[in-house]
Structures are given as structure tokens and as C-alpha cells.
Image (cartoon, helix red, strand yellow):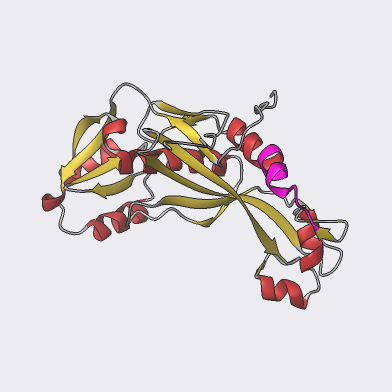
Amino acid sequence: MDGVQLQPCIYTNIFPVILPDEPVSFMAIQRAQLTDLRKLRSEIEQANRHVTVYADRNRVYGYGGDAEAFLSAKGFSKTCVLLKQVPVLAAHVVLQGIIDAALAKNFWQRRKMSLKGVDARTEIFRPTPKGITAQGKVKVFVGYDLRCAYYPAVESFGLVVDVTWAYQDDHGARLNTSQMREKNALNEALMIQEEILRGTINLQIAQIRMRNYLLPFVQEFQTIGLPCGSQARLEPEPFPVILGGKA
């Protein structure tokens, strides 16, 4: 896939999300009719069904491959929703679509998306390490801290993409920064991460992350199959920083 050539400008790390223009199908029920959402989620997990339920204001929405068959017996009914009009729900289904696609490519999650609040956020990591330190034989994995939200200032949805890192020892146990120092592996890991270059802090790290990590990730997941059906799309260029304003 051809690389994106950004014009000279200051860019954010927020990529526009284009939602479908047509309504999409969900299962839904009034929140007052569902007294115990936690119990329902437990039933879904025990039944091993591909269903997600999410409460937004006075309604509970259900989506996923098994949603209609499973939730019909729970009092849910089919409804059509224009995602642009339900921002919090839209953010969750967009991020879930990315998670599903990433897991299908053997990515793994460190932070799962919470369904208790409005913060549609997760951390996913590539399946193979970016490098392995000589000291301590620590595997260094590159990952992506992802957040999806509606941004009123630009009247658009956006996916925030940050680079994050994870460390594992040769047995697959996760390591924190203190443990990395104990293994004398932290500096070498920072070199793998390109944060240290020839013994000094790499002042070009922001540009490197944008070019080598963020843009390729967005290109890889540019088309997002939504778990409620239909598709969303990521614009390959992030929002620019708009300088200036009223005097």
C-alpha cells in the first residue's frame, strides 16, 4: 500500500472517522425494562455468544453476530439507528470493529474497552516483538493506545492513535519499568523504541512515530467492519492543527 504523503503542517494524532450515512440495525430495549445489565452480560459470556450490550442514556443497545437471536428472547427488538446521532454508541462500535479486525490478525489486548462509561478506549499490540534486548532477553512489543470520540469543534468523529509499548520476559510474563531496570534492559528497549538514538534522546521521535507507526496502522485498518453491520472508514490523514484565530 502506498504511503501517505503529508503536506508541510503541524498535525494531531487524531484521524477522522467517516460513519455510514444510512441507519444501521441494532437490538434495543428501554433501560427501565432491563433491571440487571450485569446479569445479562454474564449470561452472554456463559453462553459464549457474539453479543455486546451497551447502555446509553435511557436505552440499552445490543449488537454482534448473535445479537438478534439471543436478545429477542430478552425483550429486545430490532431498531434502526443513525450512528451520527448517538455519538457514544458510535464511538464504541467503531472501536469494537477495529478490535475485532486486529484480534483476527493475532493482535493482543492489554486494556480492554470499558462498557461502563463513555470512554471508548483500548490498547492493542502487534503479535510479534519489535525487538529483543540482549540484556535480559526482553521482548519489546509495539502497540497502539486507541480512543474514539466525537469532537464538536470540528463536528466530526475521530480516532486518537498513540504508540505504546509492552515488555515480556522469555517466559511471556509482562514486565514493568522497574523490572526492566533490574534486568538492565530499559535503555536497550528505548533504543528499540527509537526514543534513544546514539545514546541521546531522539528529538525526531514524534515524526518517526507518525511516519513509521501511526500512518501505517491507519492505512491497515482504513476500512472498519462494524459489529452492527455496515462499515466505517478512517481518513488516512490526521486532523491538522489550525493556528491563528480572531485577533
Q: Main secondary structure of the magenta part?
A: helix
Is any atom of residue 132 visible in this view?
no
- Residue 19 in which image quadrant: top left
Locate residue 17 relative to residue 41 in the image: left or right: right
Query: Relative to the observer, which residue lies in front, 25 or 236?
Result: 236
Residue 121 image point, x, y percent = 45, 51
Q: Which residue is at a point 32% across and 44% down the rendered structure image?
A: 88
Locate residue 228 relative to residue 61 in the image: left or right: right
Looking at the image, which residue sits at the far front?
247
Q: Is residue 136 magenta?
A: no
- Residue 104 in which image quadrant: top right
- The magenta segment is 201-211
Query: Relative to the observer, which residue lies in front, 189 or 73?
Result: 189
Look at the picture and state if 163 lies above or below 69: below
Q: Which residue is at a point 65% across and 47% down the rendered structure image?
A: 126
Is any atom of residue 73 visible in this view?
yes
Q: Which residue is at a point 47% across and 55% down the rendered structure image?
A: 112
Looking at the image, which residue sits at the far bottom?
182
Looking at the image, which residue sits at the far left?
32
Count the numbered circles shown.
0
Residue 157 image point, x, y percent = 40, 36
Locate residue 186 relative to residue 82 in the image: left or right: right
Q: Quadrant of the C terminus?
A: top left
Residue 125 image point, x, y percent = 62, 50
Q: Which residue is at a point 80% across and 57% down the rendered structure image?
A: 191
Locate residue 140 relative to residue 52 in the image: left or right: right
Look at the picture and state if 78 lies above or below 183: above
Q: Quadrant of the N terminus?
A: top right
Residue 182 image point, x, y percent = 76, 78
